[in-house]
């Protein structure tokens, strides 16, 4: 491993820790996302595309900002996971598309389950789907960046 590789891995680890802290903050403590309001009941959505469709239809009533923040926000929020995990890992298993996508799904499932249990936010399979897509997209960006570097 070259000195440059070690520097990249170290910077990636620092960024990954910062990313995890920010992700957890936004998922559980952000006032702008109403995370300070704890519900009296468990909230969940187990119907795939139900909330995606609802937010998409909201664009007529509320404009594009609300659906963009929810739909694109869930994707963009998990892109660093897919980009940074293979960068910081020494193990080859964490460097392939299937592993990174499954780990993004697992991390999202843990967050969604914790939101359900703590009654901060809601367990939503649509968020799980969008977050997984975000992890995959981050991995694809990493691979495209590496590919471009070799051209």
Image (tube, rainbow, N blue to C red):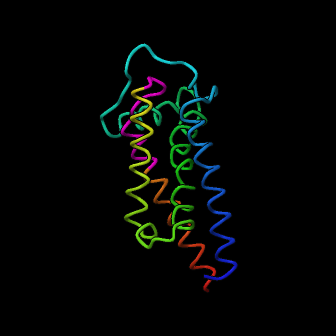
Occupied quadrant, residue 40: top left
Q: Nearer the viewer, residue 52 or 24?
A: 24
Instruction: Pick out the residue farthest to the left.
Output: 47
Q: Position of residue 13 (x, y in %)?
A: 62, 60
Residue 123 shown left or right of residue 20 in the figure: left
Quadrant where the image shows the C terminus: bottom right
Occupied quadrant, residue 44: top left
Q: Position of residue 130 (x, y in %)?
A: 44, 47
Residue at (52% x, 67% y) in the render: 89
Q: Nearer the viewer, residue 66 or 41?
A: 41
Q: Position of residue 123 (x, y in %)?
A: 39, 32
The magenta stretch spans residue 6: no
Residue 44 shown left or right of residue 148 in the figure: left
Residue at (57% x, 56% y) in the render: 80
Q: Nearer the viewer, residue 27 or 143?
A: 27
Q: Position of residue 128 (x, y in %)?
A: 40, 43
């Amino acid at each position: 491993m070259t000195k440059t590789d070690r520097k990249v891995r170290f910077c990636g680890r620092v960024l990954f820790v910062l990313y995890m802290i920010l992700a957890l903050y936004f998922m559980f403590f952000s006032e702008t996302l109403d995370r300070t309001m704890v519900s009296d009941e468990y909230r969940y959505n187990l119907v795939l595309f139900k909330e995606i469709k609802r937010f998409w239809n909201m664009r007529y009533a509320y404009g594009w900002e609300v659906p963009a923040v929810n739909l694109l926000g869930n994707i963009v929020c998990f892109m660093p996971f897919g980009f940074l995990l293979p960068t910081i890992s020494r193990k080859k298993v964490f460097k392939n598309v299937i592993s990174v996508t499954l780990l993004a799904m697992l991390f999202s499932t843990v967050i969604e389950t914790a939101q359900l249990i703590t009654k901060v936010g809601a367990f939503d399979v649509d968020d799980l789907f969008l977050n997984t897509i975000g992890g995959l997209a981050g991995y694809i960006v990493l691979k495209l960046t590496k590919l471009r570097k070799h051209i």
